[in-house]
Amino acid sequence: MAEKKRVVVKVGTAIITEESGRIDRSRAGELVRQLAELKNGGAEIILVSSGAIAAGMEKMNIDVRPEDIETLQAVASVGQGLLVQMYADLFREKCVTVGQVLLTQQDMSYRQHYLNARSTLNRLLKMGVLPVVNENDTVATDEITFGDNDMLAGLVSTLVEADLMVLLTDIGGLYTADPRISDDAKLIDRVEKITRDIEDIGGETGSRVSTGGMSSKIQAVKIAASTGVNSLIANGREPGILTKIMSGERTGTYFPASGRLGLRKHWIGYAKRSSGRLVIDEGAVNALVECGRSLLPAGVKAVEGNFHVGDSVDIVAECGELIGRGVSSYSSVEADRIKGLRSDRICDVLGEAGEEIIHRDVLIVFKEKLG
């Protein structure tokens, strides 16, 4: 762990709040102390912190998290300034300068915005500034959120090519069952590869003031691992947790990196929003998964959604399993007209020579090979 020089630390709402849901400044201060210690020791730190809505609820004396999006956004607009001011004040005491970076899922869907976010974060680190990243809850909607910032942390870890992503939660890591309700739950200290079984174990748990659960953390780890980022899920309430992690003490659940997916394919697979679906037959599934080929019209059974040339679309098997995601060479109308056809017949339908519906260079396959 001592060799992990660029570290993204994600702090869930439950880590910096009391049971009542109010911000616990003593917990936040202890977290800042550890982060500043690591930074002053030579590490580059990016903090992804939830808590804006909790801070806003406290300021406005709201005890129960609002359910309607307009009120949530209003509360977040109050809380965002308070949250970053708290961090700025606490870090200032440790002689560390912070810079706020607010992002939405929609921002990350646009290639230029995605690259701009990467450039800004890298420049802040080069200038010695500790970025404090949060979702811009004031403009995000239910359909374009990151899920208590877990997914945001995964994307940021990839953007900055982090050595390690640490997800701090209110339990000790990934367990065989929910330790809150099962006395037989056992901590899994290392996961070599995220399989369907591991995803199922993740379940759907969360606290009263947060929206994230272990499931979203597993998905964030999956995103980071695919591009060479090691990850750790640990108990953020454990005293000195970050110091223990960086000193190599075994704690939480460790996920070693599992791939080296390029930044462009990563953006296509995980950041760019999908606008539709292509249902493909068994032969096409085999061609994509086992042979690494492009998706041809002949293998497409159905076209769903309304998308345009250059939009990202999901690729699913007839049973509904997600196979991959890629950038379409055709609109949904054109794709529907040529589905099931051999490539040499596309000209007869569209009046021009045909090509792959999705070229392998702009396609990411999620399903694992059988062998």
Image (cartoon, helix red, strand yellow):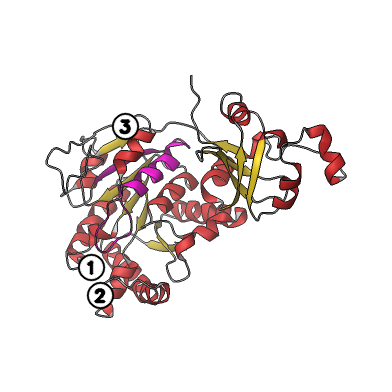
Q: Give the range drawn in magenta.
A: 205-234
Q: Are marks 1 and 2 in contact (CB under 8 Å)?
A: yes
Q: Earlier in the sequence, mark 1 or mark 3?
A: 1
Look at mark 1 in the image and give the residue it sits on.
23
CA separation, marks 1 and 2? 7 Å
Q: What residue type is labelled 2?
A: Glu
Residue at x-position 27% and y-position 50%:
168
Residue under pointer 2:
58
Q: Position of residue 296 (x, y in %)?
A: 70, 34
Q: Quadrant of residue 80?
A: bottom left
Disc 3 marks which amino acid? Val
Residue 129 place in picture, x, y as percent: 41, 57
**Helix, strand or loop at mark 3:** loop
The residue at the far bottom in this view is: 60
On-image quarter of the N terminus: top left
Number of other residues with Cα within 10 Å of mark 3, as a class: few under 14, some 14 to 19, many 20 or more: some
First of labels 1, 2 by sequence position: 1
Gap between marks 1 and 3 measured at Cα: 32 Å
The tally of labels here is: 3
